[in-house]
Amino acid sequence: MGKILVTGASGDIGRKTLLHLLKLKPADQLIGLARDPSKAADLAAKGIEIRQGDYYDRDSLSKAFQGVEKLMLTSTHAFTDRKTAHANVIDVAAATGVRHLVYMPIYHKAGSTFTMKEITEEDIFSIEKLRTSGLSYTLVQHPPFMEPAIVYAGPNAVEIGVRVPPGNGKFTAATRDDLAAAHATVLAEPGHEGKTYYLSGAPAVSWADIARILSDIHRKDVPYITISDEEYVKSMAAFGFPDFVGPFILKWVQGMNQGQWEEVTGDLEKLIGHKPTTPAEYLRSVADAAKAQESAS
Ligand SMILES: NC(=O)c1ccc[n+]([C@@H]2O[C@H](COP(=O)([O-])OP(=O)(O)OC[C@H]3O[C@@H](n4cnc5c(N)ncnc54)[C@H](OP(=O)(O)O)[C@@H]3O)[C@@H](O)[C@H]2O)c1
């Protein structure tokens, strides 16, 4: 029986996808792909085979994909040559006899002219590449991840307020863990070939809602303050990001403010079998973890 391979096994969502798959399939049917297998040693310790492979080295992918029936392509980082990386994985998967490939583009609202440099064009390219590859495939479209979406509220938001550019739009976000659980279902179960899902979170919230949720959790007034795009980009420096990251995050926030990810579908809940983590639950877990760390130190 063919095996299931997940790329990005040394990263966050790839690792979590394999951990969810372990609940559904025996370890000897699972493979993780990593540039540096030592970074996925924890998965190897659980019996998952870790194969070496680099998206830019087609020979390494060719060796790694032998005997693989289903493959999850974990998107590579923005600000890299994502077109070549994804095209290599798709081409080599088709050439080595992979039957079904699962890919995770960012959800793009039908008819919307909103684009994100470093993401939209590469996602469209990768989907088109898949369409003509001869592979069966499933698109698991992502909303913003919950974890960085909360960073987008601005540095020290609980103390100085949620400080973002203005906009009344709502957005959903989903945790990497919920998204990874959905990937695992699609990879482990039959019947997902040829389908497109939009793994939206729930409920949709605005930045003003986020300020209210933080106020409730921390039992203090966390204001919602609108600032200019320039001030917002400058504020991102507090996180220590390189200069080019601020405008990239601004673009995410502009999309959120415009309602690009406001739609709530039931796809994520159906695939994981329970309601996805809400922003309120996630923010409470962050506050609880910070409290626990404080009392331990
Ligand atoms: N929806 C959103 O809000 C959102 C936010 C951030 C990112 N994303 C996308 O989601 C992806 C996964 O997120 P994540 O949090 O799991 O990221 P991550 O922890 O940085 O994982 C990325 C994985 O891709 C692997 N990779 C990068 N370049 C590679 C190459 N040339 N060959 C083989 N593997 C390579 C990395 O391997 P190494 O360990 O060797 O670097 C790592 O395992 C990101 O790469 C990005 O495309 C989405």
Image (cartoon, helix red, strand yellow):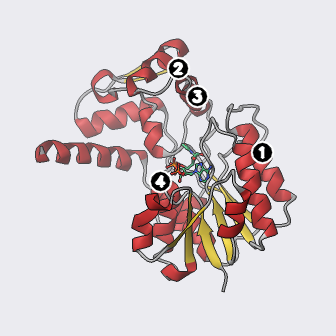
**Contact, mark 1 vs mark 4 (Cβ under 8 Å):** no
Q: Quadrant of the C terminus?
A: top left
Residue type, label 3: Phe
Residue bearing mark 1? 124
Q: Which mark is residue 12?
A: 4
In the rendered image, residue 278, in percent from the top left (x then y), is placed at 43, 50
Q: Is mark 4 within 8 Å of ligand 1?
A: yes
Q: Quadrant of the N terminus?
A: bottom right
Tag 4 or tag 2, which sits nearer the N-term? 4
In the rendered image, residue 137, in percent from the top left (x then y), is placed at 75, 65
Residue type, label 4: Asp
Q: Which mark is residue 166?
A: 2
* Left or right: where 78 falls relative to 218: right
Tag 3 or tag 2, which sits nearer the N-term? 2
Tag 2 or tag 1, which sits nearer the N-term? 1
The residue depicted at 63 percent of the width and 63 percent of the height is: 72
Residue bearing mark 3? 248
Label 3 crowding class (10 Å Cα cut-off): few <14, some 14-19, many 20+?
Answer: some
Per the model, the C-alpha gap separating discs 1 and 4 is: 23 Å
Q: Secondary structure at mark 4?
A: helix
Choose between 87 and 200: the one closer to the eye.
87
